[in-house]
Image (cartoon, rainbow, N blue to C red):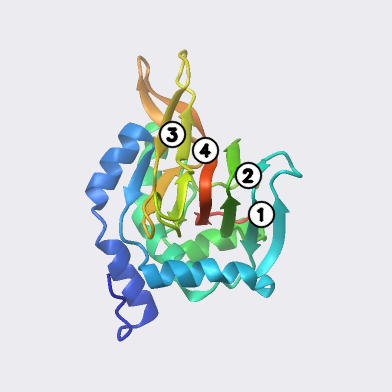
Amino acid sequence: MTADTTAPASTRWTERVGRVDWEAVTTDIDEFGGAPLPGLLTDEETAAIADLYDRPGLFRSTVDMNRHRFGSGEYRYFVAPYPEPVEQLEQALYPRLLPIARQWWARLRRPAPWPDTLDEWLAMCHEAGQRKSTAILLRYEQGDWNALHRDLYGELVFPLQVVINLDQPGLDHTGGEFLLVEQRPRAQSKGTATLIPRGDGFVFTTRDRPVKSTRGWSAAPVRHGVSTIRSGHRRTLALVFHDAA
């Protein structure tokens, strides 16, 4: 894929995201709780974003996962405003994810608080005291892993988030599958493992999602993580569509 550098940035990213088969995404995420988003970044863009990790001025904090018993590895929270690719990806993805989020909450008979634009939604987060930026760059080396968790930073939560692999499975790393574990109603948990190609995204459930039950729809809690990196390194960009308290 070659990036179009002639159109305005917002237009380029909106068109890029618009080329994803969103009908298929909706079907997959309804069935499995996660869905691939192919072709979000070019090879050049993945390399450029990965290289941002070594520019500490772009980040508000660094987390040693082992120290906090989150797994093993390290990640950094971007400070807002984000670099263009990160900001424009979030802005382009939000309106595509919004209909799914609203449909889910309708099924669960919950009020859907999310306005039409990401800026309006983040303003609501800030008014509620959730003012810390949440876009993340993660870096794993051989032997690292990410414990099952949910990215909940306050009362206001967007129910979908996106991770993008900045390295190529089988070439830059082995292992490092993206894990989803769903707690099914009155049943044992169900897990899935996905290898995400370089430059592709994966959209998944932030906290819980609707699943069909004998009473209509029930909320199934979901956690995510990363399996052990067997060799090489794995770097990812994570986009969370709510800010943190």
First in sequence: mark 3 or mark 2? 2
The residues tagged by marks 4 and 2 sit, at their Cα atoms, a distance apart of: 29 Å
In front: mark 3 or mark 4? 4
Which secondary structure lies at badge 2? loop
Residue denoted by label 3: 209
In the image, what residue occupies the spot 35% across and 83% down?
Answer: 8
Q: Residues within 10 Å of mark 1 (few under 14, many from 20)?
A: some
First in sequence: mark 1 or mark 4? 1
The correct choice, above or below, for 61 with respect to 30 in the image is below
Q: Residues within 10 Å of mark 3 (few under 14, many from 20)?
A: many
The amino acid at mark 4 is Ser
Taking depth in this image into account, of 221 and 114 the one nearest to the observer is: 221
Which secondary structure lies at badge 4? loop
The correct choice, above or below, for 224 with respect to 51 in the image is above
First in sequence: mark 4 or mark 2? 2
Residue 155's label in the rendered image is: 2
The residues tagged by marks 1 and 4 sit, at their Cα atoms, a distance apart of: 34 Å
The residues tagged by marks 3 and 2 sit, at their Cα atoms, a distance apart of: 17 Å
The amino acid at mark 2 is Glu
Answer left or right for 179 relative to 54.
left
The residues tagged by marks 2 and 1 sit, at their Cα atoms, a distance apart of: 8 Å
First in sequence: mark 3 or mark 4? 3
Q: Is residue 104 visible?
A: yes
Answer left or right for 209 relative to 24.
right
Q: Is residue 161 visible?
A: no
First in sequence: mark 1 or mark 3? 1
* Residues tagged 2 and 1 counted as in contact (Cβ below 8 A): yes
Residue denoted by label 1: 128
The residues tagged by marks 3 and 4 sit, at their Cα atoms, a distance apart of: 22 Å
Residue denoted by label 4: 227
The amino acid at mark 1 is Ala
